[in-house]
Image (cartoon, grey):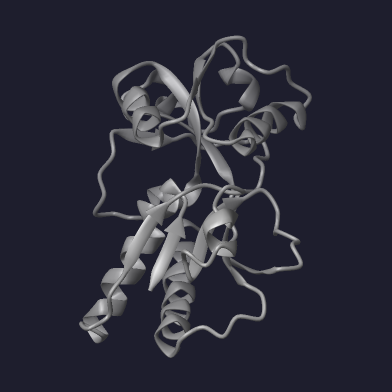
Amino acid sequence: IRVCASPAVCMGLLPRAIVNFTRARPGARFQIQEGIYPHILKPLRGGDVDLAIALVPEKPNEEDIRATILLRDSVTPAVRVNHPMTQCRQVALADLLDLEWVVYKSSKTGREIFDHCFASNGLATPARIIECASFACTLAMIEMGNYATLLPTQIFANPTHKMGISPLYMQTPMPRWDVALLARAGLDLSPVCLAFIDELHLTAKQIHLSVA
């Protein structure tokens, strides 16, 4: 089973689904690539992967791509676990304007979501921004410094994965950033791929219940 997935998906939903799937099917084999939307569509269209799992701001509407929303999610500001902002019961987005932000920007989508987050709430974009094309570096900077970033809520759903990063509890509405399963339209997937898709839906439902 050849899968290309977004970095946040590779930290939660995908490994959980693979572990569960291979317990029942120890002979199943996987090839995993990392990528982000919309760049993730290239290996999918080229036949290099069977499935893609990506964070998307809205459900893709491409004639040659079959898209299904696996997990409805939103972004949340996040900071290091001992950051002073974590002591607040609820935070307004306006309270975070003076922080220095790290924006994960491996494509224009990451920056667009960041800008939309503030603009949709009638706020100017924060003045101090570091753009980072590495998801691992983004997380490390948040853990080590006084920075803030936007992360999908579902990344905090795995109780066994301890990060030095904490989500903030927001009173301000935050933009959607759903997890979509993508496949080529009209392509007959193998029975093992179809079985894995069922596992992805089951795992996504478990994550939804844990973050709801």
Q: Position of residue 169 (x, y in %)?
A: 51, 37
Up the image or down, 162 lies above or below 58; here it is above
Residue that protrudes farthest toward the bottom in the picture: 191
Q: Is residue 175 visible?
A: yes
Number of numbered labels in the structure image: 0
Residue that protrudes farthest toward the front in the picture: 46
Residue 22, quarter of the rendered image: bottom left
| Residue toward you, 59 or 171 | 59
Up the image or down, 20 lies above or below 34; here it is below
Residue at (56% x, 29% y) in the render: 91
Q: Is residue 163 left or right of 185 when viewed as pictured?
A: left
Q: Which image quarter is the N terminus in?
A: bottom left
Q: Position of residue 34 (x, y in %)?
A: 41, 50
Up the image or down, 41 lies above or below 28; here it is above
Q: Is residue 73 visible?
A: no
Q: Is residue 144 left or right of 3 when viewed as pictured?
A: left
Residue at (31% x, 70% y) in the render: 30
Residue at (45% x, 72% y) in the render: 200
Q: Is residue 155 left or right of 180 when viewed as pictured?
A: left
Residue at (35% x, 60% y) in the render: 32
Q: Position of residue 21 (x, y in %)?
A: 31, 78
| Residue toward you, 190 or 140 | 190
